[in-house]
Amino acid sequence: MLAKNHVQFSIPLEHRRFVNDFRTDDPVECEEFIADLLLRGYKINSVVHDGAPLSRSEFDSAVLLAAKTAITKLLTTALDLDEAEMRHRFSALFDKIGVRKRCASF
């Protein structure tokens, strides 16, 4: 049985890129994995949901949502904030960039 979510990504090595895959049925785990890829600067080649590649807008929404997760991790760590204080102080920022709770594909 195929996993619902499939992320293909590239890891840069000295003179080439190593292509790898990540598969999961858990949408939250997929979002967190994409956030980790963003934090490490790895190239996200494609995201597939239920066997079909995400459309451009769905892909952008998934990456934007993962970016919110990555930003949240960075801010809570760097400023030593708990999640409630982080949401209180920076919710206007996330509202301004239009990040929704979950994208339709996840």
Image: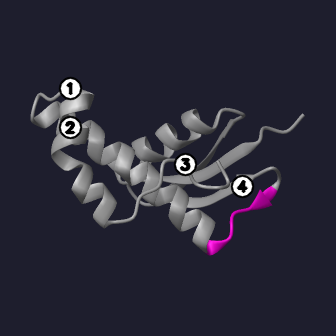
Looking at this view, name the residue that lies furthest to the right: 1
Q: CA distance from mark 2 to mark 1?
A: 6 Å
Which secondary structure lies at badge 4?
A: strand
Q: Is residue 76 visible?
A: yes
* Front residue of 60 and 33: 60
Q: Amino acid at mark 1?
A: Asp
4 in magenta: no
Q: CA distance from mark 3 to mark 2?
A: 19 Å
Q: Nearer the viewer, mark 4 or mark 1?
A: 1
Specify few, some or many for label 2: CA neighbours under 10 Å numbering under 14, 14-19, or 20 or more. Answer: some
For the magenta stretch, what is the residue range? 52-56
* Front residue of 77 and 86: 86
Residue at position x 26%, y 49% from top?
91
Question: Dot 4 corresponds to which residue?
Answer: 48
Question: Dot 1 corresponds to which residue?
Answer: 82
Residue at position x 68%, y 70% from top?
55
Q: Amino acid at mark 3?
A: Arg
Question: Dot 3 corresponds to which residue?
Answer: 102
